[in-house]
Image (tube, rainbow, N blue to C red):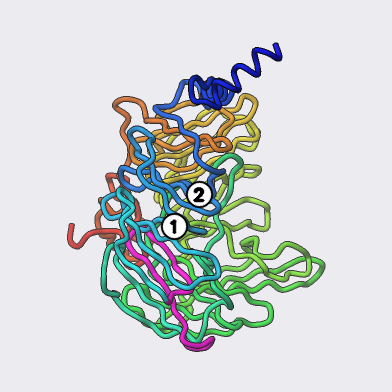
Amino acid sequence: MLLGLVTVVVLAATGVWNPFPGIWDWVDRSKPISEPDVVWQQRVGGTPKSVTIAGDTVIVEQRTRVEARSLATGTQLWEHKADWAAVAGGDRDAVVAVGKLLVKGYELLDPTTGVVRRRDGDAVAVWTYRNALLDVRCVEATDCTLSAWDPRGTRPLWTAFLPGVHSGLLADNPDLLGTRRLGAQRIDRGVAGPEAVPPLLGFPVDGRVHVVDTATGRVLQNVQPGRDERLAVIGGRLLRITATSRDGTCYFAISARDAATGQEVWRRTGLNLRTADNAGCVQREDPQGARNVLIGVAPDGREAVVDGYDGRFLQIGAQGEKLLAVDDRWAVVRSADKRSITGRELSADRTRWTRAAGGKSGAALTPYAAVIAEEKPSRLIAVDPRTGRELVLLRTSANALAVGPNGMIIGEGREIGYVRWGAGAAVPPPPEEGGVPDQNPGSTYLPPSDEGSCGPKRELCPDGG
């Protein structure tokens, strides 16, 4: 055996015959990460920090680099050294913003070729959306300029002055004052990809909140929260959330104000938005919700979905029910007995579908599908949010990483794979590709074709219609 091993080493060293790569490939061969098998499965260089479907490509962010792969085959298209990466734009105009930690500036790369489309050497932070990209640069700590760009634009759409931002260099998508999404085990928080830019954004600067109109760049408000208050900018409104400690409990009040005039538009009391985590009532968290809606808990323990624009109750759950996912159009709810989950249409507050599920099921809503993660057995399921029709069912312990119009990316460790929806599956189009202006601008709106919410300023709907 020793003589044979020496012979093999000599042959390999002289280049005559080298069996070691083949042996290693056999040992390191990847096992399928789901059943049925994925369309393709690839091993990336490191555990992904984020995965995003951008048109015909898959953008994989890792610790020190970002790479793009073909959505059709999984083959690598390009690789770029970067400490952070984020995708802006939709399926047809996507770009990849990349940069290095503790270094000013960023680059915008073409997702298909990796070619640099635009460079910036001064920005300290970048926010990426489906229909815009925002960046901020600071001459001094108290002298900053916020700029908005089309994803592939070469000139800013507008600029606004801000008296500073969070201290330091902030890389991609630092926190703003909005909603805090519900999470689920085995479903990545960025599974839905970039969303449309909200009509208003709240920038926290030195204990104050600067409210910026994203259509014009005007700074509408510069507000100092009170001692018992937390401010949030949701649904085109500035929300002042008060939590007062009295009688051993927290008493909550929400006042929604028009950002341009400061006048109160709606008000609710007794609704706990889960901004305080103890009886001291110190509010350290943003309210739960998504896009233009809020999730609150009524005094009787029932969960409710509230329209951030006009304060309407879009849904009030039954006793013991649990919200798993919510957006402007839909809610996914687990029943009180934990044996089923239902999909509900918020505009009509009615149940559209019901399916059996376990007590530990989690869910997420995307523009293209509702994703459900189940345990014992471990499964990932994607359904049409309108009808509950099953798009795909996978027996897998992998995570759902990204959802696109025709399928989703799943991953486990360094392995990622692409799953295509079943043949003939009807998938809802993305929000910006349809919809009709609402007669009540600002309210949560579901058009007849279920194509999404127009938003408080009709920013998601085309003109006319």
What's the residue at 32%, 70% (across, down)? 149
Instruction: Name, please, the residue furthest toward the right.
Output: 248
Placement of 67 over or under 209, stated as above or below:
above
Under tag 1, what secondary structure?
A: strand
Q: Earlier along the polypeptide chain: callout 2 or callout 1? A: 2
**Percent coordinates x, y for residue 81 in the rendering:** 46, 55
**Mark 2 is on which residue type?**
Ser
Quarter of the picture holding the N terminus: top right
Q: Which mark is residue 50?
A: 2
**Residue 138 covered by magenta stretch:** yes
**Residue 314 covered by magenta stretch:** no
Q: What whole-number distance in Å separates the C-alpha atoms at marks 2 and 1?
A: 9 Å
What's the residue at 50%, 76% (across, down)? 203
- What residue did someone put label 1 on? 86
Residue 153 seen in render:
yes
Q: Which mark is residue 157?
A: none
Residue 395 seen in render:
no
Quarter of the rendering containing residue 362: top right
- Number of residues whose C-alpha sits closer than 10 Å to that of mark 2, classed few (under 14), some (14–19) or many (20 or more): many
**Percent coordinates x, y for residue 173 in the rendering:** 49, 64
- Number of residues whose C-alpha sits closer than 10 Å to that of mark 1, classed few (under 14), some (14–19) or many (20 or more): many
Instruction: Tell me where the magenta segment starts and ends, as one range.
Output: 122-143
The one nearer the camera, 441 or 400, is 400
Q: How many marks?
A: 2
**Percent coordinates x, y for residue 101 in the rendering:** 54, 65
**Percent coordinates x, y for residue 295 in the rendering:** 56, 56
Query: CB of mark 2 within 8 Å of CB of mark 1?
Result: yes
Quarter of the picture holding the C terminus: bottom left
Under tag 2, what secondary structure?
A: strand
What's the residue at 28%, 62% (across, down)? 152
**Mark 1 is on which residue type?**
Ala
